[in-house]
Amino acid sequence: MSDLEIRNLHVQINGKEILKGFTLDLPKGEVHAIMGPNGTGKSTLAYTLMGHPSYEVTEGEVIFKGQNILDLEPDERSRSGIFLAFQYPVAIPGVTVANFLRTAVNARRKAENPDDKGISIPEFRRMLKDKMSMLKMDPAFAGRYLNDGFSGGEKKRAEILQMAVLKPEIAILDETDSGLDIDALRIVSEGVNTLRGPELGVLVITHYQRILNYIRPDVVHVMMDGRIVESGDADLAQHLEEHGYDWVREKLENGTVS
């Protein structure tokens, strides 16, 4: 059974329906990519999965570990093992990367065991040093204020570091390639690839094929008009890069989508 099952999901914002019967299975151990033109609902999907209050689910369900997570608050979804890397991470002046991550780790531990006293500072430092070394990050990064004055690439690397520390079972990357130059894109992608494995399912949401040159997906889905209209292997992303989305629109208009 897939670890994340999205069934006939309908979502609206300010009375306008954005997702229109979206369905997807994402098993742990696989990387799925969702591609599509602007305005088709890709970011709406990401925010809905994490429980953003502005997005109203009118129909459908999202099953994770046998439970409909639409009944859970955003923090409960996170503690259950779902992670969202934001397209535009928020800066938090005055809070260091290390303090932010230690607080997040302790919140998750406390939720699992109310009697947990939290991770000790020496243990946390060892763990953080190990994760940063794995991601080839300068240890000084941990002492900087979270995303405050960060470049686009640094913000996205901070998101991947959070993912490494929190060890989710499902990770949603919402246009992580947005605003990155080639070097930053490669570094962030290498971080994601380092974390790939049988216990992690990854959903990469993107406009462009270029990030998929580095993070090779098992399955590529094309999203249009609030739902998936075409799926295939990694070669589908290359086909979209070369031919655009017009051929998919034609299939959609002719009623011949897969």
Image: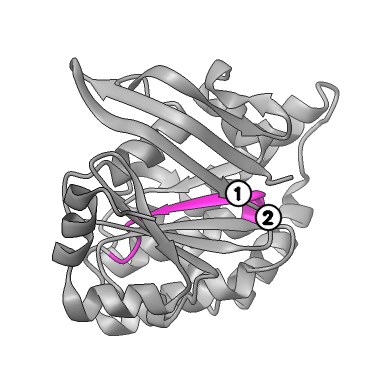
| Along the viewing direction, whichever of 18 and 178 lies nearer the viewer | 18
Q: Which mark is residue 28?
A: 2
Query: Percent x, y for residue 255?
Result: 26, 48
**Tag 1 or tag 2, which sits nearer the N-term?**
2
Query: Percent x, y for residue 38?
Result: 16, 51
CB within 8 Å, label 2 to label 1: yes
Question: Can you see residue 210?
Answer: no
Query: Percent x, y for residue 35?
Result: 32, 59
Q: Which residues are magenta?
A: 165-177
Q: Is residue 69 left or right of residue 159?
A: right
Q: Is residue 127 left or right of residue 93?
A: right
Q: Which residue is mark 1?
A: 170
> Which color mode does the image show?
one colour
Question: Which residue shows up at 62% across the image and 76% down it?
Answer: 133
The C terminus lies in quadrant: bottom left
Question: Which residue shows up at 54% across the image and 54% down it?
Answer: 162
Q: Is residue 258 above or below residue 19?
A: below
Q: Which mark is residue 226?
A: none
Query: Percent x, y for residue 223?
Result: 31, 51
Element at badge 1?
strand
| Along the viewing direction, whichever of 105 and 59 lies nearer the viewer | 59
The N terminus lies in quadrant: top right
- Label 2 vs label 1, nearer the camera: 2
| Along the viewing direction, whichever of 61 and 158 lies nearer the viewer | 61
Query: Type of residue at label 1?
Result: Ile
Question: Which residue shows up at 61% across the image and 56% down it?
Answer: 201
